[in-house]
Amino acid sequence: MKIVDTCGQKCPAPLIATRRAIREAGPGEVFEVITDNLTSFNNLSRFLKDNNTDFSVSEVQGKWNLRITQGTVAESYTKPQDYCSTPPAAFPKGNFIIVFSSDRMGEGSEELGHLLAGNFIKAVKDLDLLPAKIILYNKGVTLVSEESPVLENLKDLARMGVEILVCATCVNYYKLEGKTATGILSNMFVIAQAMASAGNIVRP
Amino acid sequence: MEVDLLQMVENGGCSAKISPRQLEEILKYLPLPDDPDILVNIDTHDDAGVFRVNDTLALVLTTDFFPPVCSDPYEFGQIAAANSISDVYAMGGDPVVALNIMMFPSSKLPMEAYAGILKGGYDKAAEAGVRIIGGHTIDDFPPKYGLAVVGYIHPENIITNAGVRPGDYLVLTKPVGTGIILAGQRLGIALPDDVEEAKRQMKILNRSAAEIMKKYKIRGATDITGFGLAGHAIKMASASGVSLTISMKQVPLIGNTYRLSEDGCIPGAAFRNLDYTGEKTLFASDLDYNLKMIACDAQTSGGLLMSVPEEIVSQLLGDLHASGLADSAIIGRATEKKPKLLQLDN
């Protein structure tokens, strides 16, 4: 398998190498692109998604390995309806964010903890002011997995305009790649910035 | 010693701007001073602030500085100055005086480079009729240069982001592509002719475009810089309460900008801008990917984007062409507000 190693190169050199590799590859051919630059990795991912190119990612010690399949069309990322939908009425938001670092609420019984987390998320929908953002990291990311019992409530919040930031490293760690059903996969910089600029942080 | 400023930077020019999304997040938490004499503030994301002195005079204040966009110190000084002064022109003002803002690594570069940058700035300011009356330098690497500029304007003649009306045509006065061409230059894949053309465009003052804009009493305009064509269009649409539609194939491009983009030479700043514009933009389902990224390409010292009523658009365009701005073109139109502030078509 062909490997395009762009380590040490900065934007846009890795993208130039990737575009060339896609052009040169035969239909359906699989090849790998390696980068050690987070910005380049994010931009490559965005480029591949925008061009409906199937790829998977593994991260090892600060290097990202993108396994790309030439000519494949993944699930369409740019369906017109994604862009055309009329935004729902604006729900007022407060100057606070909610952070879930676990899929449970409080110490004690695990079962009760899950139940409480679900109730909490449901209650958030009824607050006078919605949170500006909800941030999920560590085990918290499982709340947006396809199997999550609170998924529908989180999807509702997303539809109401609450930005849900999901730690991508955590998603990879818990092997949930492609299995998160709402929220935006984010890096630690975005998360740190959101937390640093929040008026209040609510940790259930 | 041959000085090559370009080897010192990863993001030159307005590509070095902080992401518009990050900026918006932070500005939300800074209270704006409440004063009736502040006629324009960052509320509408305008190019400059405007402060009323009396009923016939207001001051236009702006500052801009950035790392090198080219190798030659003198040319860098010219481009940085043209870019700084441009914000006054975009508001319809007359630039009057300026201060230098310089960061310069005196232990890494010869003082001739310092002098070269300043000389470029002085010469470009002189061309604009601007007197540089002082400045400030600190020792820093990599070098950065720009101006803080003050201009005059009549309080009733301010041209802002908020002056676009549905039905107006959008006219752009300079071709797009400086970010992509400069990235290509750093990697050695841009053609020398294209690099020369990009530098020529960046050095052009927006003065004659602004004079024509004032002649036709245009109310809405901005200059295209670090947030790219799409980013600045969104800020205009948002401030004016309208939506804009841009036909990317009508947008003039510098030389081989499209081919470089096709080769993947898309700078990181374009992705950063896409991050911001993406959710506010309706991309036509058949929109060419390269044109989409070109719309997000960060421009340095870009042209003016004006909102022009239908009755005068052909005359105004004729005046722009006659003034030497040969690439000026109609690139789109304003409509009533739609769910998305911007629509990008092929």
Image (cartoon, coloured by chain):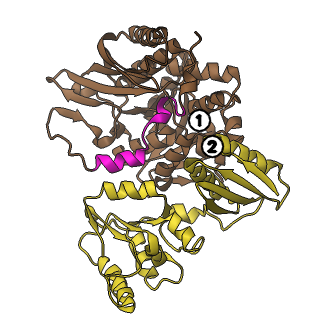
Q: Quarter of the image holding residue B53?
A: top left
**x, y (%) of residue B66?**
44, 27
Label 1 sits on a secondary structure element that is loop
Q: Chain of mark 2?
A: B
What is the tally of numbered marks visible in this picture?
Answer: 2
Q: Amino acid at mark 1?
A: Val
Q: Main secondary structure of the magenta part?
A: helix
Q: CA distance from mark 1 to mark 2?
A: 9 Å
Along the viewing direction, whichever of B303 and B272 lies nearer the viewer? B272
- Tags 1 and 2 both on a single chain: yes
Q: Amino acid at mark 2?
A: Leu
**Residue pointed to by mark 1:** B251
**Residue pointed to by mark 2:** B291
Which hue belongs to chain B? brown
From the viewer's perspective, tell me whether residue A169 is left or right of residue A107: right
Q: Which one of the lettered chains is coloured yellow?
A: A
Residue B19 counted in the magenta span: yes
Along the viewing direction, whichever of B248 and B194 lies nearer the viewer? B194
Q: Quadrant of the N terminus of chain B?
A: top right
Dot 2, crowdedness within 10 Å: few (<14), some or many (≥20)?
many
Q: Which residues are magenta?
A: B10-28
**x, y (%) of residue A201?**
28, 65
Q: Quarter of the image holding residue B186?
A: top right
The answer to whether the residues at label 1 and label 2 have Cβ atoms under 8 Å apart is: yes
**x, y (%) of residue B29?**
25, 50
Label 2 sits on a secondary structure element that is helix
For the point 50% across and 12% down, the residue is B74
Q: Is residue B314 above or below residue A76?
A: above
Q: Chain of mark 1?
A: B
Along the viewing direction, whichever of A93 and B160 lies nearer the viewer? A93
